[in-house]
Amino acid sequence: MKNRAKCKICKCIIESFYRDDYVTCECGEIAVEGGTDFYKVIARDFSNFLRIDDEGNEIVITVKEEIPLKLNQKQENKVVKNTYDDSIEPSKPNKEELLKMLDRFIESLEKLPTSAMSQPVTHYDLLSTLLLISSILRS
């Protein structure tokens, strides 16, 4: 199953594609992270969060852990919700999905400002790129 959610406020559907892919909705009410490795959710108000399955249906999730965050006044109500549902088996993306991920990765790099393009690449950046390319070649 994909790590996909919908915000009830802005109606934005967001999806995390890989482990360190942190994605927020347009209004900043909800966020997801973890790709298909784990399902981490951050929400100001968890009642505004909807999990969306691969067919676009809402599914019920179980909140197993709540971690209050120390944030500034604007974000004081934000809470991390880790949703580890053992009944959900993480899916492996097919070759077409991996190639789309690579295309999105390239597009996001092309949108970086010139100053960012001249900055050094971290080992996390390199590892993410190599894992994606390796997955594509193996599929």
Image (cartoon, grey):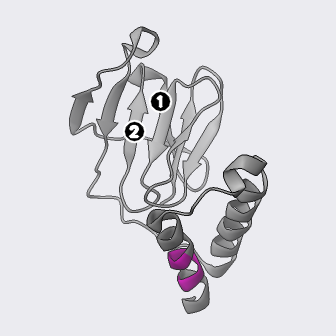
Give the quarter of the image for residue 37: bottom left
Residue position for label 2? 41
Q: Is residue 36 left or right of residue 13?
A: left
On the rendered image, what quadrant is the C terminus found in? bottom right
Q: Position of residue 90 (x, y in %)?
A: 40, 65
The crowding category of the residue bearing disc 1, from other C-alpha atoms within 10 Å (few below 14, some 14 to 19, many at least 20), is: many
- 2 or 1: tag closer to the N-terminus: 2
Is residue 112 visible in the rendered structure shown here? no
Residue position for label 1? 49
Three-letter amino acid code at disc 1? Phe
Q: Position of residue 10 (x, y in %)?
A: 65, 23
Give me the residue at 40% from left, 33% from top.
Answer: 42
Give me the residue at 68% from left, 70% from top.
Answer: 102
Q: Position of residue 64 (x, y in %)?
A: 21, 39
Query: Hey, which residue is sitting farthest top in the picture?
Result: 73
In 3D space, how far apart are the residues under numbered discs 2 and 1 (Cα atoms)? 9 Å
Magenta segment, which residues? 130-134
Give the quarter of the image for residue 82: top left
